[in-house]
Amino acid sequence: MKAITKELRHYLTKNEGAKTSSKLSEEFIGSSNIEAQKIKIEREWYIFYYSFLNIAKNSCENIINKKKLPESDKFISIGIIYNIKHSLEIVVKALYRTFSNGKIDKSDYGHDIKKLIKEFKKGNNKKIKRTPNLSNEIDKLEEIMLKYYELSFLKKYLKDSFNINDIENTFFKYPENKVNIRVDYSEFLNKVNMSDIESIKIDINEISSIILKIKKLIK
């Protein structure tokens, strides 16, 4: 719990100077300072990222602590993976705000985390020097984002777990089509095992470590 509190405190602290969340609340109540509001909003994006990621982390830990994975818990992996994916979307948007002084495109680049990380990497902020160490951490973040974008680690379970519904008969007609792929989630998730949950937990720790390093490198 102490480690979690310490990590959360990091997202509640300004990049320059230390202020607790309570002091920040006092500062922003009734404040019309645009720059101060930008800092507050940016910080809240990191808090949301932290919240969703730790829902996934706590769920993994609860399963691992049981030392068994009954069928009822296998379905929890849906929520675990979704919360990881959503936390990745939120944190790259948060980083985009950090690197662009609170400015971001109105569309926020949608929910495509593959496009989000590529757009973020193309961005430039003269105030934040992209050192080799910083670039390395961003590359590691991109790697893990693509893993959860493609769900490559779950492809081995898709065999015999999906049906193709070629409603408009376009599957072999056009290279781009409107084919509907229906996943049998019961069959699919039944193949999830404790090793998968443990691997996901490792990824969660890695994501947390990467983001903390990035935040420290841009102070």
Image: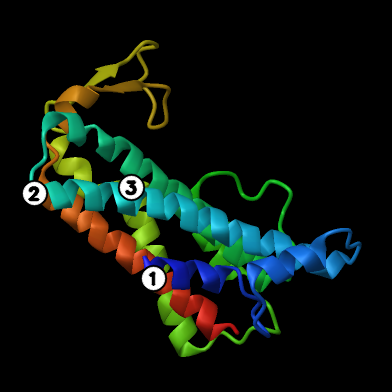
Label 3 or label 2, whichever comes before in sequence order: 2
- Left or right side of 13 for 212: left
**Residues at circles 1 and 2 in contact by the CB criterion of under 8 Å:** no
Between the C-alphas of marks 3 and 2, the distance is 28 Å
Q: Quadrant of residue 76?
A: top left
Q: Mark 3 points at which residue?
A: 150
The residue drawn where x is 38% and y is 32% is 175
Question: Which circle, 3 or 2, is nearer the viewer?
Answer: 2
Q: Nearer the viewer, mark 1 or mark 2?
A: 1
Q: Image quarter for residue 26?
A: bottom right
Residue 134, placed above or below residue 34? below
User: Is residue 138 shown above or below 91?
Assistant: below
In front of the other: 94 or 25: 25
- Would residue 200 be seen by someone viewing this image from the given angle? yes
User: Badge 3: few (under 14), some or many (20 or more) residues near its Cα, within 10 Å?
Assistant: few
Other-residue count near label 2 (Cα within 10 Å), few / some / many at <14 / 14–19 / ≥20? few
The quadrant in which the N terminus is found is bottom left
Q: Earlier in the sequence, mark 1 or mark 2?
A: 1
Residue underneath mark 2: 67
The answer to whether 29 is drawn above or below residue 168 in the figure is below
Query: Where does residue 200 sit, x and y in percent of width and height?
Result: 24, 54
- Residue 219 horizontal side relative to residue 68, left or right: right
Q: Is residue 208 left or right of residue 12?
A: left
> Mark 3 or mark 1, which has the lower sequence index?
1
Secondary structure state at the residue bearing disc 1: helix
Question: Mark number for residue 2?
Answer: 1
